[in-house]
Image (tube, rainbow, N blue to C red):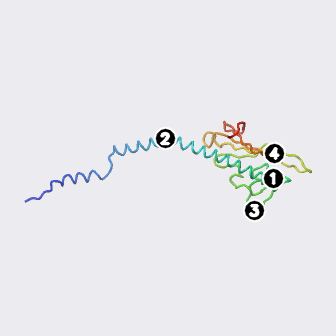
Amino acid sequence: MKCTDPFRRQRTHRSRRTNGFTLMELLIVMAIITCIILIAVPTTRSIFKHAHEMSAKKSLQTIQQAEIMYQDTYTANGYACKLSDLGGDASAGAPTPTAAQILKPDLAGGIKDGYIFTVSHCAKTSVNGVDRANAYEVTAVPEAVGKSGDRGYCLDQYGDLKFDPTGGANCTQPVQ
């Protein structure tokens, strides 16, 4: 007498079926992932640009605060006409007018978060035979317009923050 299980054939068929995905299922999942990536990539780029622009504005405010501290510390010099004067290495010794150790090295180096920072339009007057800077403008322009940022920013000694919509340093429009 032969003992047979009528469900044996169905169980073996079922166990082979659950071992993996079919090619069609994998292709559908890959298509869905591709669609999500195509939607997300442009959004991610704009988020990064916006973050770089926000960082540039905050960095300009940091530089302005450093300029005020520099002017208070080195009253004979007035404002610093170079970012490197606001920087400096603390392990090199005490702060000096050419290395005040107020700004962090990345910002004092002039490049941070896709923007290039420079101090320009440094107006000087002579007081007792010593040149004293009494005005300045700091600019922040994107390293690659359209990639690291769309706008250029400028800030003067009064704290007036303006922008250039073309990404340059010709700042005419106030930031609100």
User: What secondary structure is found at the residue carrying circle 3?
Assistant: helix
The answer to which of marks 1 and 4 sits earlier in the sequence is 1
**Disc number placed over residue 71 in the picture, else none:** 1
Which residue lies under the disc numbered 3? 92
Mark 4: few/some/many CA within 10 Å (<14, 14-19, 20+): some
- Residue drawn at (79%, 50%) of the image: 80
Q: Report the quarter where the N terminus lies.
A: bottom left
Which residue lies under the disc numbered 2? 39
Q: Nearer the viewer, mark 1 or mark 3?
A: 1
Q: CA distance from mark 4 to mark 2?
A: 47 Å
In x, y percent, where is residue 25?
34, 45
- Residue drawn at (46%, 43%) of the image: 36
The answer to which of marks 1 and 2 sits earlier in the sequence is 2
Q: CA distance from mark 1 to mark 4?
A: 11 Å
Q: Is residue 115 left or right of residue 2?
A: right
Which residue lies under the disc numbered 4? 135
Q: Nearer the viewer, mark 3 or mark 4?
A: 4
- Residue drawn at (81%, 56%) of the image: 73
Q: CA distance from mark 1 to mark 2?
A: 49 Å
Question: Mark 1 is on which residue type?
Answer: Gln
Question: Mark 4 is on which residue type?
Answer: Ala
| In the foreground, 117 or 156 | 156
User: What secondary structure is found at the residue carrying circle 4?
Assistant: strand
Q: CA distance from mark 3 to mark 4?
A: 29 Å
Callout 1 touching callout 4 (CB < 8 Å): no
Q: Is residue 159 left or right of residue 35?
A: right
User: What secondary structure is found at the residue carrying circle 2?
Assistant: helix
Question: Mark 3 is on which residue type?
Answer: Ala
User: What secondary structure is found at the residue carrying circle 1?
Assistant: helix
In x, y percent, where is residue 163?
69, 39
